[in-house]
Image: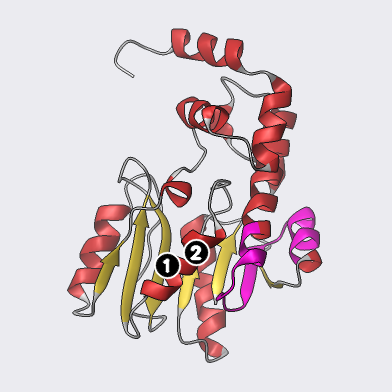
Amino acid sequence: MILVPVKNFANAKQRLSPVLEARERTALAKAMFEDVLATLAQCQSRPEVSVVTGDSHARRVAEAHGFSIIEERENRSETDAIAMASAVCESQGVKFVMVVPADIPLMTAAEVDTVLARAPQEGSVLVPAADRRGTNAIVKSPLNLFSLRFGNDSFQPHLASAQASGKPVVVLELPGIALDIDRADDLAQLITAPIRTRTQRLLAAWNLSERLQQAWQARPAHA
């Protein structure tokens, strides 16, 4: 089972407020989510996909792709949403999960297929964020192998938990999955990459170069 957690879009991506207005952040979050689901729909080897959400737009997009929904009406953290969804999956006899976030628009179907192909029958696969702080994709088999705790510095704790399980651990460096969009620097990387996603086309239409420059100039010297 592939799980994609997504919170309500109305208050998405607050850390991008120095660069984007609220309506733009909402539009960006929706575009990234749509890119992620479109990519998953192209994967040759994927298992069932479930979107963990209480957002009506996310539900419609998921259903348009034929993906299932695990209702998450509390708009909880990614960690809590995935814990709830994992419990649902376990009750249904699901043997393993792969978790991917909704803000990695450059993820490719080939990368997802690689993660699934490299997953041990019992064990885990971890794909770190580009800065090797966060975890941008993770596979666990069996589903309850260890607990997940997402956040800015989740990769090393996840790696330690995976190693402590005594089962094989695979760490993959995959550039599309590695780029999650949370800060102005992430936007700049996305804008300069060859355009192939709806998210990039949206950002290109906004012509953000000047705003990004202003955001960098306004940052504290130690940032």
- Region rendered in magenta: 39-62
1 and 2 marks in contact (CB < 8 Å)? yes
User: Is residue 111 in view?
Assistant: yes
Crowd class of label 1 (few under 14; some 14 to 19; many from 20; radius 10 Å) = many
Look at the image and say whether residue 111 sits in the magenta stretch.
Answer: no
- The amino acid pointed to by label 2 is Val
Q: Residue at x 59, y 20 (%)?
A: 19
Could you tell me which quadrant the C terminus lies in? top left
SS category of the residue bearing label 1: helix
Residue closest to the eye, 156 or 170 = 170
Q: Amino acid at mark 1?
A: Val
Considering depth in this image, is 132 or 112 the residue closer to the camera? 112
Residue 115 badge? 1
**Left or right position of 79 against 206:** left
Crowd class of label 2 (few under 14; some 14 to 19; many from 20; radius 10 Å): many
Residue 16, horizontal then vertical, whole percent:
56, 28
